[in-house]
Image (tube, coloured by chain):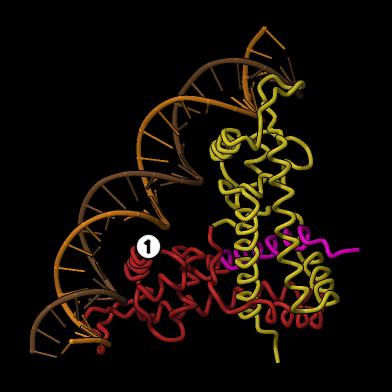
Chain colours: A yellow, B red, C brown, D orange
Amino acid sequence: MPTNGPALAAGILQLSAQLVDGIQQGLRDRGFHDVRPVHGYAFARLSGAPATASDLAAHLGVTKQAAAQLADHLVTRGYLRREPDPTDRRARLLVLTERGRACTAAADAAADDVVRGWGGRLGAGEVDRLAAAVHALAVPGRLRPAW
Amino acid sequence: MPTNGPALAAGILQLSAQLVDGIQQGLRDRGFHDVRPVHGYAFARLSGAPATASDLAAHLGVTKQAAAQLADHLVTRGYLRREPDPTDRRARLLVLTERGRACTAAADAAADDVVRGWGGRLGAGEVDRLAAAVHALAVPGRLRPAW
DNA sequence: CCTAGGTGGACAAGTACCTTGACCATATGG
DNA sequence: CCATATGGTCAAGGTACTTGTCCACCTAGG
């Protein structure tokens, strides 16, 4: 019997939907009401090192105008601040504020909650195995689905 | 060492992105250029039995106006047709046309391609195990992520 | 019956988020 | 130094949604 591709695909998409919904809910529960999932992808990029709006655009797969607008949103709400790039006077680095780091931490905690829930239903060993398979398959690339 | 929730979450989202991108590409390769991922969710709902726009709206998690607009799009392009509901004169059933069924089959084939690719990198046994874990976790619910 | 509320659908207006196009300031390689 | 590339911004437009309103029809309670 062949592996049922469409069924697995649907399952993964449902799991994604659960994950996104769960993280959004967890963020709301922790007091962050003004962030959308796409902001999470921006945080993921910025939590390592600061980046420019153009970097962010490439990472998210959108135009630099869209990335700049998203950054505006997050600056306005206190999650990011813009700083001059000491090595390029054209560029403005996007840097996480304290609130931005708190939001990133809250999103991580919410993700942990969801995954812990999976462990309760599946067993920790199975979740580890799932994580290993996912890690092997998920080539590091664009994070955000193009829809 | 605790399971790394955020890393698993990121992996699943990347896997979803791969899946969606792969299916979209597979549909283009098969000659379907005018469908978006959200249409796939509509097809998934309609491939079983016809449904009304309101059914579709609930299934997709959008307003019935948005569902009706989406259905218009698919009717215009020949994927769906509207038929009167014999049991309710208000309702108009959405039914897959031949082209709609062909598109659904193409999406399934594209999903199979992606999953086959996974099998090549992971081994069929691991993919089966992944499918089992996903199946156990993916409670049947809203398919589409809320973004 | 028949009336009251619920549900399917459509029309209209507004909004959020993204695009394309044009432009300027600064970097960088010949 | 000049040509070209790159980071950023402004402006206009588009698409896919939303909310609000309305009507046709169904359905359950007197």
Left or right: A140 as drawn, with respect to B33: right
Q: Position of residue C6 (x, y in %)?
A: 30, 76
Q: Amino acid at mark 1?
A: Ala
Q: Main secondary structure of the magenta part?
A: helix
Left or right: A71 as drawn, with respect to D22: right
For the N terminus of chain B, the image quarter is: bottom right
Disc 1: CA contacts within 10 A as few (<14), some (14-19) or many (>=20): some
Quadrant of residue C3 within the rendered picture: bottom left
- Which residues fall within the magenta stretch? B1-25
Q: Secondary structure at mark 1?
A: helix
Nearest the eye: C12 or B116: C12
According to the image, label 1 marks what residue? B66
> Is A127 colored magenta in this rendering?
no
Q: Position of residue B116 (x, y in %)?
A: 71, 76
Q: Position of residue C9 (x, y in %)?
A: 26, 71
Residue that appears at 25% across and 89% down = B86
Question: In the current view of this chain or complex, which residue is farthest to the right?
Answer: B1
Question: In the current view of this chain or complex, which residue is farthest to the bottom?
Answer: A1
A71 vs B103: above or below: above
Q: Chain of mark 1?
A: B
